[in-house]
Image (cartoon, rainbow, N blue to C red):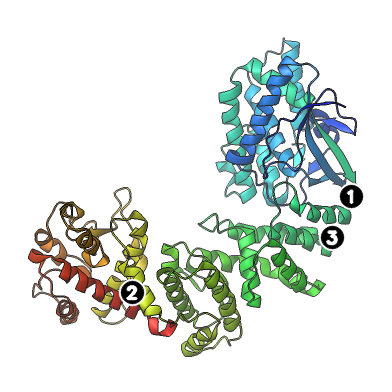
């Protein structure tokens, strides 16, 4: 058979083989799209498959663009066919065809057929035979005689969404309640395809013609495997083809291959419960199964695990007996809950309390396994504070990420060796014994890191804000009786959409730096020239000179900002003592705001920051 053209642009995350334009139907067991969905029925995505994961702006976009190119060719040349690739299925005891390879493609194709069908509803003239026939063929591709979808996706309730799209005919899913990751992806892709049809096909006649081409001129070859264990083995070997399989996908596949078929439902249920916990992680890039099983692995082994193959190898060694697999199944949901709490920076023992607030500010995640390892410690709060302090040191000392990752593995191992009743001193000592935990010369490294920050650089804003927030919290706590307990998150909340929050105030204002030397500009843009003000405390205009802001500073709710103004005499003794101590170390004269004052204030801020960080414990 002569191949006229190869149209599919090579796209490493799209296809596992190239689509081809042919002069006739392929010889090796060819199935047109309509025949495939009608005869290979019901098609089921098995429990051990990964989630539906194609991205609308990536794989789906390329898929549709390629079909469009072929459609234009097929309109001009009658004998043009499109080989979409191979579909591998396995028959099960319920007379279903489980998809071994091709689920991403088939699911997207099914969503396309559903969207084409729904796009034609109410527009077909049943008196026109060609229109009625095409519509009936689409309907037969998507649903059976009882209007049940021909593609079943029970894992993460994907079938529920596919059925909804066929019968309710809309991607509005409020009636379905909270959606799983797969359900959300199905809805997103369907909406993308609907928009594409509206913008690219537009007219009924074009939609009908495109539908006929998709159903009759796009072919797939179908390979049927007779044995599920063989299918599971094949699935794992597909790791280097198509959209790469992550270790978590392969781990799930491995688990199914190691347990009796009659326990598949139990494992599916436990895996889904875990996945629902991960779906509640605020940072979607963090709330994925791969990150979860990696953090779990490090938290129970104290070994650094890098890459999918080592991670899968670890779990295969760890789950070498039926008893260990049973324990793993039971632990899926509780470990998922633990991961979700920590990944959302919430205390797993008290979800109302923040933990690792510095990590939250900087979107950190490496430390999750340490906290998972210490989940049973009575002094878990102390460990979370220590983790936060060590993470902040990593940020400001500019430690290499690879180095910090190695610290986390060793640290997790030391925490695992502690009794649940370990004291704060024992937790600190175990941490200090971890390889790489201590950073020699840390105070000087942090001092250098802070002093090189500049208000003129937007990329430095997060680090500047955190230093000011930590120093402000430290001084506010000193100035009040007992444990004040105000979370640093409050100091880090920025102003958004007229919601009050913290502003970084440049005491002089950059507008006055135009005529200053380059060195003076550097000093006046350093941390010593900044303070935090709450937006509702009558935030002054940037053109206001320092001495004109004295009343704003005096009325501030934060001690460090108050210290910029003279004492009013109405302060409590404790507040007065703290402010007098600040002013003794950094004499302030807003009428003469010069580089010498800013330099002294920078040194004071760095020193206070190091004290609040407890840098001596970490070096």
The residue wearing badge 3 is 262
* x, y percent for residue 286: 55, 59
Q: Are marks 3 and 2 in contact (CB under 8 Å)?
A: no
Residue 384 vs 45, above or below: the answer is below
* x, y percent for residue 179: 59, 48
The residue wearing badge 2 is 447
Q: Quadrant of residue 501?
A: bottom left
Q: Quadrant of residue 339?
A: bottom right
Residue 304 vs 173, above or below: the answer is below
Q: Nearest to the eye among marks 1 and 2: give it.
A: 2
The label on residue 93 is 1
* x, y percent for residue 154: 73, 48
- Determine the residue positioned at 61% across, 38% down: 189
Residue 559 visible at all: no
* x, y percent for residue 454: 30, 61
Separation of disc 1 and disc 2 at Cα? 68 Å
Where disc 3 sits, the SS reads: helix
- Determine the residue positioned at 65% across, 69% down: 305
Question: Seen from this angle, which residue lies furthest right?
Answer: 226
Q: How crowded is mark 1: few (under 14 residues within 10 Å), some or many (20 or more)?
A: few
Separation of disc 3 and disc 2 at Cα? 61 Å
Q: Does label 1 or label 2 sit earlier along the sequence? A: 1
Q: Do the residues labelled 1 and 2 touch (CB within 8 Å)?
A: no
Q: Does label 3 or label 2 sit earlier along the sequence? A: 3
Q: Nearest to the eye among marks 3 and 2: give it.
A: 2
Where disc 2 sits, the SS reads: helix
Q: Quadrant of the N terminus?
A: top right
Relative to 333, 259 lies left or right = right
């Amino acid at each position: 058979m002569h191949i006229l053209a190869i149209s599919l642009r090579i796209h490493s995350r799209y296809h596992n083989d190239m689509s081809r334009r042919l002069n006739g139907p392929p010889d090796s067991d060819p199935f047109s799209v309509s025949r495939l969905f009608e005869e290979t029925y019901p098609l089921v995505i098995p429990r051990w498959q990964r989630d539906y994961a194609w991205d609308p702006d990536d794989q789906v976009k390329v898929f549709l663009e390629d079909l469009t190119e072929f459609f234009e060719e097929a309109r001009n040349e009658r004998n043009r066919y499109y080989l979409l690739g191979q579909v591998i299925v396995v028959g099960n005891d319920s007379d279903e065809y489980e998809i071994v390879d091709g689920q991403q493609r088939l699911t997207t194709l099914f969503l396309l057929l559903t969207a084409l069908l729904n796009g034609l509803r109410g527009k077909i003239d049943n008196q026109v035979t060609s229109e009625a026939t095409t519509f009936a063929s689409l309907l037969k591709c998507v649903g059976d005689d009882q209007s049940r979808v021909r593609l079943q996706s029970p894992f993460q309730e994907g079938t529920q969404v596919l059925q909804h799209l066929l019968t309710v005919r809309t991607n509005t899913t409020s009636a379905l309640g909270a959606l799983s990751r797969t359900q959300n992806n199905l809805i997103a892709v369907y909406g993308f395809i609907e928009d594409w049809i509206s913008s690219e096909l537009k007219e009924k006649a074009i939609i009908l013609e495109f539908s006929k081409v998709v159903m009759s001129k796009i072919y797939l070859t179908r390979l049927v495997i007779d044995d599920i264990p063989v299918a599971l083995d094949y699935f794992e070997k597909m790791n280097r083809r198509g959209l790469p399989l992550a270790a978590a996908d392969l781990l799930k596949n491995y688990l199914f291959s190691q347990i009796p078929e009659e326990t598949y439902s139990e494992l599916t249920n436990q895996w889904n419960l875990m996945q629902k916990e991960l779906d509640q992680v605020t940072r979607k890039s963090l709330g994925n199964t791969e990150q979860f099983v990696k953090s779990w692995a490090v938290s129970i082994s104290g070994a650094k695990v890098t890459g999918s193959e080592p991670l899968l190898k670890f779990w295969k060694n760890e789950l070498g007996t039926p008893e260990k697999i049973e324990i793993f199944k039971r632990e899926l949901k509780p470990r998922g809950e633990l991961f979700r709490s920590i990944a959302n920076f919430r205390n797993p023992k008290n979800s109302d309390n923040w933990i690792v607030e510095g990590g939250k500010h900087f979107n950190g995640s490496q430390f999750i396994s340490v906290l998972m390892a210490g989940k049973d410690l009575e002094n878990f709060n102390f460990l979370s504070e220590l983790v936060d302090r060590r993470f902040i040191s990593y940020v400001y000392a500019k430690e290499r990420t690879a180095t910090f990752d190695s610290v986390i593995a060793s640290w997790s191992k030391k925490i695992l060796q502690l009794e649940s009743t370990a004291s704060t001193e024992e937790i600190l000592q175990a941490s200090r014994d971890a390889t790489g935990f201590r950073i020699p010369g840390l105070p000087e490294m942090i001092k250098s890191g802070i002093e090189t920050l500049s208000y003129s650089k937007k990329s430095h804003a997060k680090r500047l804000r955190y230093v000011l927030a930590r120093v402000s919290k430290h001084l506010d706590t000193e100035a009040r009786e007992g444990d004040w307990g105000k979370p640093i998150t409050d100091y880090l909340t920025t102003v958004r959409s007229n919601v009050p929050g913290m502003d970084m105030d440049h005491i002089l204002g950059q507008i006055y730096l135009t005529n200053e030397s380059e060195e003076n500009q550097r000093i006046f843009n350093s941390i010593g020239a900044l303070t935090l003000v709450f937006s509702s405390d009558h935030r002054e205009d940037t053109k206001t000179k320092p001495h004109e802001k004295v009343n704003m500073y005096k009325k501030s709710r934060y001690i460090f900002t108050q210290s910029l103004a003279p004492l009013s005499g109405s302060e409590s003794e404790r507040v007065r003592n703290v402010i007098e101590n600040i002013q003794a170390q950094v004499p302030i004269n807003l009428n003469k705001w010069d580089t010498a004052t800013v330099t002294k204030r920078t040194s004071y801020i760095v020193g206070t920051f190091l004290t609040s960080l407890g840098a001596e414990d970490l070096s």
